[in-house]
Image: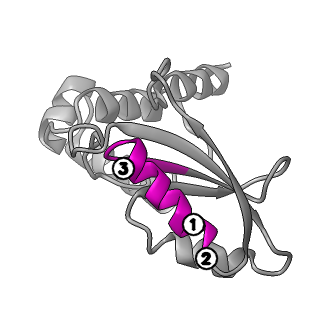
Amino acid sequence: MTVDTLDTRILRLLIEQPRTSIREYARILGVARGTLQARLDRMERDGVITGTSPALSPAALGHPVLAFVHIEVTQGHLDEVGDALAAVPEIIEAFSITGGGDLLTRVAARDNAHLEDVIQHLIQLPGVVRTRTEVALRERVAHRLLPLVESVGRASAK
């Protein structure tokens, strides 16, 4: 899908002002409400916009410890382990990866002892061979997409 300059402007507004109405977005952009809605529908259909839920803070929910747990899996058991990870509430993301390990998970914990309990649970899952954990000390660049959106928009304008 091609994201053009208007799409980029729409996405910027969605990121910067997520609680604004469609009518207000259309007014700000100087386009008809129907045009804006059609663009939003297309970007949702094409998978550019994947959700509208609020960004939440694990720390504010009482889970300030953030760790990345690499998981090595017995060959042929990746899907089973992936399914089991989905049942662990402290795992907030999991990815299949290349390199050292088979899966990379992002884990939120109440404290270091809780993190250890989560890791011990992961080690006991059928198909898990070993784990390696790295604790995040401080977030240096928050999750963001706006710079990428703007880069794509600039490239489409050329």
In the rendered structure, find residue 122 and report the number of the disc placed on it.
Answer: 1
Position of 50 with respect to 58 (left or right) is: right
**How is the protein colored in the picture?**
one colour
Q: Residue at x 46, y 26 (%)?
A: 146
Q: Which quadrant of the view contains residue 87?
A: bottom left
Q: For the magenta stretch, what is the residue range? A: 106-124
Looking at numbered disc 1 in the image, what kind of residue is underneath it? Leu
Please provide percent x and percent y for residue 85: 53, 70
Camera-nearest residue between 17 and 98: 98
Name the amino acid type tagged 2: Leu
User: In this figure, which residue is indicated by the disc labeled 3?
Assistant: 40
Whether residues under marks 2 and 1 lie with C-beta atoms below 8 angstroms apart, the answer is yes
Task: Report the Cα–Cα distance between label 2 and label 1.
Answer: 5 Å
Question: Percent position (x, y) of residue 68?
Answer: 58, 43
Disc 3 secondary structure class:
helix
**Could you tell me which quadrant the C terminus lies in?**
top right
Residue at which label 2 appears: 125
Vertical relation: 76 (above or below) 139: below
Dominant SS type (magenta): helix
Specify whether residue 79 is painted magenta.
no
Query: Which residue appears at 46% of the width and 29% of the height?
Result: 144
